[in-house]
Image: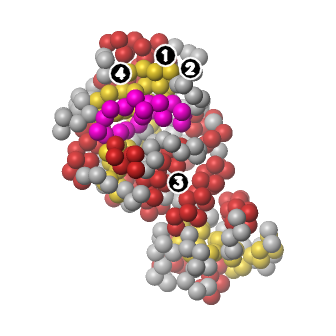
Amino acid sequence: MQNSLVSILIPVKNTEDFLEECLDSILQQEYKNWEVLAIDDTSTDSSLAILKSFSEKDTRIKVYSNSGTGIIDALRLAYAKSNGKFITRMDSDDIMPTNKLAVLVNNLKENGKGHVATGKVNYFSKEGISNGYARYEKWLNGLTENGTNFKEIYKECVIPSPCWMVYKEDFEDCGAFFSNRYPEDYDLTFRFYEKGLKVIPCSEMLHYWRDYTTRTSRTSEHYAANYFIDLKMHYFLELDFNPNRPLALWGAGNKGKEIAKILDKKGVAFTWHCDNSKKIGKTIYKNIMQHFNTINDLKNPQCIITVANQEEQLEIINFFKESNKKQGKDYFLFC
């Protein structure tokens, strides 16, 4: 197991408060054959100095300055400098448990190429974790434990950005970080899915995910809701949409309306459905809102579901199960 080099790609931008703890957790790994490719992305604090200090003490930590702008360029540079058989990513404000690399490498070696190794994650914060993040953690860990992550890929990002590992050949085949689409972690997850990589089930907690108010995913425009919808629709229409089957849209809230706009813009015909008596029969964006029961009148439809309420989602899933419809083929949860 110790023979294969692991390349750990780390973009770094103004994380001086957490960077030492992050690097210390890597130095404490049970698995020793690794290299860190740390890319300073124009930090204005002491992050670069911290990186250089660690690099002077351990030559496995290699430090570079971003030759471009932003996280995608930083990741591209890190990957270009990598030499490992296995590729993984780490966030400079997070923490690895000591067994993380060992478990991910073992799982990949046992299952071979064509797989993604990941693990459970644990959010932590001085301010406490919001209900939204707690729900996301529970949902994501449930998928990871069973290796069913891609089943709900249109709902949220199903592979945690700082907790995955793949063979370098598979990473190349998936397009590495050459895509310009944001959010870059969700885009990469879709490309893993597109290339048919299988998620290895894992019940171990392998990543401590730090949350705080100035975290990039909270502050950057590239992680705004509209980017997620655009990305989901791009890959749905490319990978799972069957133009020979009628398309139904279930949900008349904001997400439903955004998706309706995208479908109209792309000239994709669809029927629109909900259970809101105040909206049924009205014309919205040139589409007449219909009762959801009329989906049964369609011949072998596909359905995008944008209803966020969990209880209503369960009822919707049961609606499709009664007709022997399958998630990921006949209906897709987008919330």
Eye-nearest disc, 3 or 1: 1
Taking the magenta stretch, the answer to whether it contains residue 87 is: yes
205 to 29, vertically: above or below: below
Locate residue 248, reporting x and y percent. Answer: 63, 75
The Cα atoms of the two marked residues, 2 and 4, are separated by 18 Å
Residue drawn at 26 percent across, 42 percent down: 105
Q: Amino acid at mark 4?
A: Ile
Locate residue 90, reporting x and y percent. Answer: 41, 34
| Quarter-of-image position of residue 300 | bottom right
Locate residue 194, reporting x and y percent. Answer: 45, 58
Residues under numbered marks 4 and 3 in contact, where contact means CB atoms less than 8 Å apart? no
> Dot 1 corresponds to which residue?
48
Q: Which residues are magenta?
A: 71-91
Residues under numbered marks 1 and 2 in contact, where contact means CB atoms less than 8 Å apart? yes
32 to 319, vertically: above or below: above
> Which structural element holds mark 4?
strand
Residue 111 appears left or right of 21: left
> Which structural element holds mark 2?
loop
> Dot 2 corresponds to which residue?
43
The Cα atoms of the two marked residues, 3 and 1, are separated by 33 Å
The Cα atoms of the two marked residues, 1 and 2, are separated by 7 Å
Residue drawn at 52 percent across, 64 percent down: 239
Q: Amino acid at mark 3?
A: Glu
Taking the magenta stretch, the answer to whether it contains residue 92 is: no
Residue 280 appears left or right of 54: right
| Quarter-of-image position of residue 88 | top left
Say the numbered circle drawn on residue 61.
Answer: 4
Locate residue 38, reporting x and y percent. Answer: 43, 25
